[in-house]
Image (cartoon, rainbow, N blue to C red):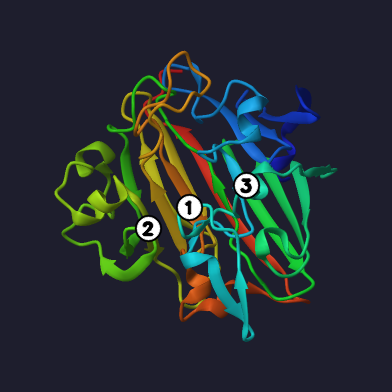
């Protein structure tokens, strides 16, 4: 029997024709997802003392998600992360897509998937949402049909499974942009201990476009053993200065015999609450973002968010890969199926319950 069968699904109107859906497992853990942007709104989970907190950053109601500048919890597409100059070529045809991050394309453009209304489809395993993206939207070629399935199991593992088809060759790079704070907003993420299973990361230029792969050894970017995020942010590293913190893609270790296998790639532990987040993915890259641009963002709390109030771990292809040597790997062609699975498993260490 599947662990994913032990859940309940409920819904509540959120205004403006938007509905929020709640997945709840048998232990009372709850994940709220909106059909605006297939967005993760909340994840309520207990700490070591049994007290439940929301470990996701976000807005108090749907109105904030109508614009959602920080991309709180959004399902990102058609292209997650950046494309240099918003330009690429497919089969010798040049394309110019929406540039919404200076001279670069970011997260699907100004009308990305995180702002679209997704259709909810019946599914016995969880919450399935689908989206049709027309050819020419944001400048991308091909009509695209995307499906995402959110599942919450009895052990506290949230699974996000993506699939997509297209009627013309098009770049695709989908990801989830959840901002986590495992202490439930009692403080920033400085004390969180992060581990990332990667020997290399991608150094960036001033526009945050990757320029080269570099070894993590001996740098602030070495999280092969757990290290506190806050302490690493104080290291005198030029890459941290350029990005204002961590906003870099890690080149994840992969099994060459099975490069698309689901494997554990990162863990984050908050000593205060005892919550630990373990991430697994089928993707080659992991964007670690330390909430560098959160200052002054009005969220769901009484005070505005501050820098480093949350972190993102976004599983994806490499930024600007569509212009790299391995561009064919991110082109979805007619008759082929795009697939990706990423999981976030939440456990509690040292529980008193």
Residue drawn at x 21%, y 44% is 232
Residue pushed farthest front?
103
Residue 314, given in percent of the width and then of the height, sits at 49, 51
**Which residue is identified by label 1?**
101
Above or below, comparing residue 329 to residue 82 in the picture: below
Viewer-side label of 3, 2: 2
- Earlier along the polypeptide chain: callout 2 or callout 1? 1
Given contact means CB atoms under 8 Å apart, are the residues at marks 3 and 2 in contact?
no
Please state which of residues 262 and 308 is positioned toward the viewer in this rendering.
308
SS at mark 1 in the image: loop
- Earlier along the polypeptide chain: callout 3 or callout 2? 3
Above or below, comparing residue 292 to residue 351 in the picture: below
**Which residue is identified by label 3?**
75
Residue pushed farthest right?
122
Viewer-side label of 2, 1: 1
Q: CA distance from mark 3 to mark 1?
A: 18 Å
Residue drawn at x 53%, y 38% is 69
Residue drawn at x 45%, y 47% is 313
Residue 63, given in percent of the width and then of the height, sits at 65, 26
**Which residue is identified by label 2?**
208
In this picture, residue 157 sits left or right of residue 275: right
Given contact means CB atoms under 8 Å apart, are the residues at marks 2 and 1 in contact?
yes
């Amino acid at each position: 029997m599947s662990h994913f069968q032990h859940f309940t699904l409920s819904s509540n109107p959120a205004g403006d024709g938007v509905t929020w859906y709640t997945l709840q497992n048998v232990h009372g853990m709850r994940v709220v997802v909106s059909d605006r942007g297939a967005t993760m709104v909340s994840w309520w989970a207990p700490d070591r003392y049994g007290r439940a907190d929301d470990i996701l950053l976000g807005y108090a109601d749907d109105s904030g998600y109508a614009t959602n500048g920080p991309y709180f919890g959004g399902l990102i597409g058609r292209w997650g992360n950046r494309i240099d100059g918003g330009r690429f070529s497919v089969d010798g045809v040049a394309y110019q897509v929406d540039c919404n991050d200076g001279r670069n394309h970011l997260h699907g453009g100004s009308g990305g998937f995180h702002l679209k209304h997704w259709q909810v489809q019946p599914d016995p395993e969880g919450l399935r949402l689908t989206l049709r993206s027309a050819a020419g939207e944001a400048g991308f070629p091909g009509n695209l049909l995307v499906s995402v399935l959110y599942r919450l199991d009895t052990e506290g593992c949230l699974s996000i499974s993506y699939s997509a088809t297209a009627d013309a060759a098009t770049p695709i790079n989908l990801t989830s942009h959840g901002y986590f704070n495992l202490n439930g907003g009692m403080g920033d993420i400085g004390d969180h201990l992060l581990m990332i299973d990667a020997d290399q990361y991608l150094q960036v230029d001033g526009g945050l476009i990757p320029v080269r792969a570099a070894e993590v050894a001996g740098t602030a970017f070495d999280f092969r053993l757990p290290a506190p995020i806050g302490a690493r942010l104080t290291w005198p590293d030029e890459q941290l200065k350029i990005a204002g913190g961590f906003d870099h893609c890690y080149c994840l270790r992969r099994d060459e015999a099975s490069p698309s296998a689901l494997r554990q790639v990162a863990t984050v532990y908050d000593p205060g609450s005892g919550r630990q987040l373990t991430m697994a993915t089928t993707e080659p890259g992991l964007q670690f973002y330390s909430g560098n641009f959160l200052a002054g963002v009005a969220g769901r709390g009484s005070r505005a968010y501050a820098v480093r109030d949350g972190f993102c771990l976004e599983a994806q292809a490499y930024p600007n890969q569509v212009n790299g040597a391995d561009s064919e790997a991110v082109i979805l062609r007619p008759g082929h199926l795009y697939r990706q699975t990423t999981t976030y498993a939440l456990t509690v260490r040292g529980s008193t319950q």
